[in-house]
Structure formats: structure tokens, C-alpha cells
Image: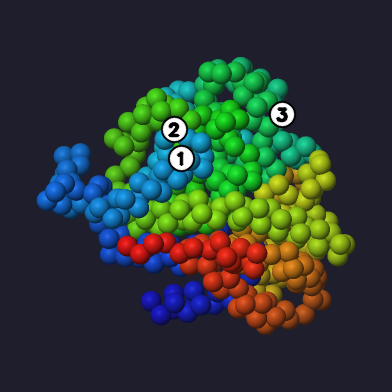
Amino acid sequence: MYAVEAEDASAGTFLHLTANESWASETARRIGGLRVGDRYVVGPGDDLGVEDFAGFTFSGYPAASSLLASATRAAKDMLGAAEVSLAPLSGVHAMTCALLSLTEPGDHVVCVHPGTGGHFATAGILRRSGRHPVFVRYQHESLSIDASQLAEAVCSSGARCVYLDVSSTIRSHDLASIRSAVGPDTRLIYDASHVLGLIMGGRFQHPLSEGADVISANTHKTLPGPQKGLLAFRDQDLADRANDVIDNALISSTHSGSTLALAVTLLEMEEFGSEYAEQVIANSNALGASLSELGLDVRTTPDGAFSENHQVHLFCDRFGTPSEVASRLHRARISGNVDTAIGPRAYLRIGTQELTRRGMAEPEMSTIAAMLNFALRPAGGDLGHDVSAFVAQHTGSAFSFSASNLPARLRSNARRPESG
């Protein structure tokens, strides 16, 4: 136990630049750690405080149930969804729930090849459940999925479902072209695990209005919540069909503590999401520009932007093998992922979502670029103390109900939740 606590303290001295982790607020973590998280929160209960649920009788939790209802309403509003489920336990569980509830054994499902940025688990889930994956490639030159190739894959396989599961990307999908190409009857599921917070903040694309039927996502990347999952449905009938399968076959406990922490995070996004998402994207482009000015090679979109979301792709092949680069960064107390999913070159898949949640803005991106430039070079020397000192200046949670370090222009708008 003490070793884990010490390890946690040590990890807190690292600069975390991974694109697949988050920084939950103190409020969310506190609510998620309450004893009510050990209970089944299935409803507010009747006048006697009793809740009957699916043949079981539970104690009612009116305050917790009200919090969950408010968060679900907020998620529906932010995503433009007819229905939202906070029940999935993770992103892969949400993926499993979506695929198994909306397809049948024997169906073909089109997804993105994992060697070009698709999720590693999608094909395995499909095969193990009697479905058949059909792969399309994410084009690293255009950073897009070719809609005509996608349509051909749907037509040639007879697939009734497309799962857009690109995990390594710096731009949005052309969903209108994809929907037009595959036709109105093909189920289109959009994996928003990486960009969910930016969608909710209104600073990225809007999948459900652009052609997607379902959003499937985890909740701990740009949505800075606990490790949970979420499903959002454009159509109520589709939601009812999916939830009938999910509720009766794929989920029992929804893990109350994590769900309550997610509820707090969703309400924080409703309050601060627009400014947060705007700052994430601004930070990505500021970091990309600073790295480029230092002579480092950074991926850009066809329009010349360094990013449309939280990811910045810094090519690192000139500095050694992926393991050498990762080890060099670790010695400098920098946590980063080396990726090879898009194109022939290895790159650092940097995420700015945690940096933003910790209150960092454009000036700090310049500092981080200089640290990376120093740390990547074989003769860079010892940077660990400087990195830890920098991290120690940013320990709060901006854009949250527990914010103590909002950027100055937003401090007057920061509000704490009402008591109770």
C-alpha cells in the first residue's frame, strides 16, 4: 500500500504528455471516492426510501440519482443526442456494447485497420463475437478516410455497420461525405474516445448532426473524467433497441463511484467546456509552432495547422528507435507515447488535454517545447529536476468546480457547485 502511494507521488513529478490520459478534478475525485460508490445507485427510491429495480430491491439514493440525471441531461444537450448512457465501464466496453447491440452474429463490420490508426481491440471483439471485420485504411497523406473506398468496402462485404475507430489523428472526419457514400441505411458508429471533451465544448465536429448514428467513447482523454465509458444515440428508437440488449446482457453494475465522478465531470464540461476546448486546441497549435520554430519536424494538416484537436505529432525517428526515445524522455521525467500508426515514420503522439486542465496556456507550451528539444537529444543532460519543478507549479484543476488556477481571463466566471 505504501509503495503504491510512493509511486503515485513519484508519478506526480512527471510531465505527462500522453494523449490518452486525463486530469480529473478534485471535486470529481472526491465524489467518486465516497462510500455511496460502494452501493448500487439505481434510483431515488419511493417515499420509504426503497427502489425496486429489475426484480431486486435497493435503498434509494435521491441526491446521487439527481446528480446522475442532471449529468445525463447535460451530456444529451452537449452532444445533441436523443439518449445517452453512462453505464459502460470503459471505452472498449462501450465499443463492445455498441457493436453487439447493433449488429448480429455473422454480420460484417467495416473498421479502420489498426496499422493505420484504428483501435487494436475492434477486430478482436468482432471476431470473438462471431462478426467479421472489414478493414479500410486511414490515409496518412491526407489524414482522412477515403469515402469512396469506404463505400466500396461496405458494398463488397454487405456490411451493415461502420465503426470509425481512429485513435491517432490531428483532424476531424468528413462525416457528411462518409454518410453520403455509405447511404442512409448503414449504421455509422463514431468512436469519440479521444475528442469527446472537444465535441462537448463545441470546438470540434458534431458527429450526430453530421451523419453518425451513435457515439461510443471512453471518458478520460479530452473529457477529463474517470475511466468509464459513454454511449450517445441520435435516434430514440435506436437507443431503445441497443439498451434493451445492453441492459439485459452486457452490463450489471455500472460502478457507482466512477459514474458519479463522471457525472461531476460532465457538469463541469457544461459549465466550462467551451473555454476548455478552445484552450486545448490553442495549446496544441502553440506547442506545434514552438516545436517547429526549434527546428523539429511536426506533422501538419493539409490546411497547414498543427492540430484540430488535442494531439500534436512530433516526428522523432531522427533521435533513435522508439524505445530509445521513450527511455530518454523518461529519464527527463517526461511521460510520452511513441506511435507508428500513421505513415512510415515514428512520432511522439503528444496530448495537450492534461496540460490544459492543469491550467497551462500558450506561454507554457513554449517552455515544454524547449524541454522536449533538450530531452530528445542524446547529449541532452539531466533535465529531471527542472521538469519536476515546472510540474509542481501546475497541480490544480482548471476549468472545473474546484478550479484554483484558471487563466486570469476566466477567473471571474469560475463558479463552485451549490452546496448539497
| Cα–Cα span, label 3 and label 1 | 30 Å
Vertical position of residue 291 compared to residue 107: above or below: below
User: Which residue is drawn at the image coordinates 62% and 77% (left, top)?
Assistant: 393
Vertical position of residue 46 compared to residue 127: above or below: below
Which residue has dot 3 on it? 146
Q: Is residue 149 left or right of residue 13?
A: right
Q: Are marks 1 and 2 in contact (CB under 8 Å)?
A: yes
Circle 1: element type:
helix
Q: Are marks 3 and 2 in contact (CB under 8 Å)?
A: no
Residue type beneath disc 3: Asp
Quarter that holds the C terminus? bottom left
Q: Earlier in the sequence, mark 3 or mark 2?
A: 2
Which residue has dot 1 on it? 76
Name the quadrant containing residue 416.
bottom left
Residue 201 x %, y %: 58, 48
Which residue has dot 2 on it? 82
Circle 2: element type:
loop
| Cα–Cα span, label 1 and label 2 | 7 Å
Q: Earlier in the sequence, mark 3 or mark 1?
A: 1
Residue 127 x %, y %: 48, 33
> Do we see residue 40 in this rendering?
no
Residues 157 and 48: in front is 48
Name the quadrant containing residue 327.
bottom right
Q: Is residue 360 left or right of residue 46?
A: right
Residue 413 x %, y %: 56, 61
| Cα–Cα span, label 3 and label 2 | 29 Å
- Label number found at residue 249: none
What colour scheme was applied to this rendering of the protein?
rainbow
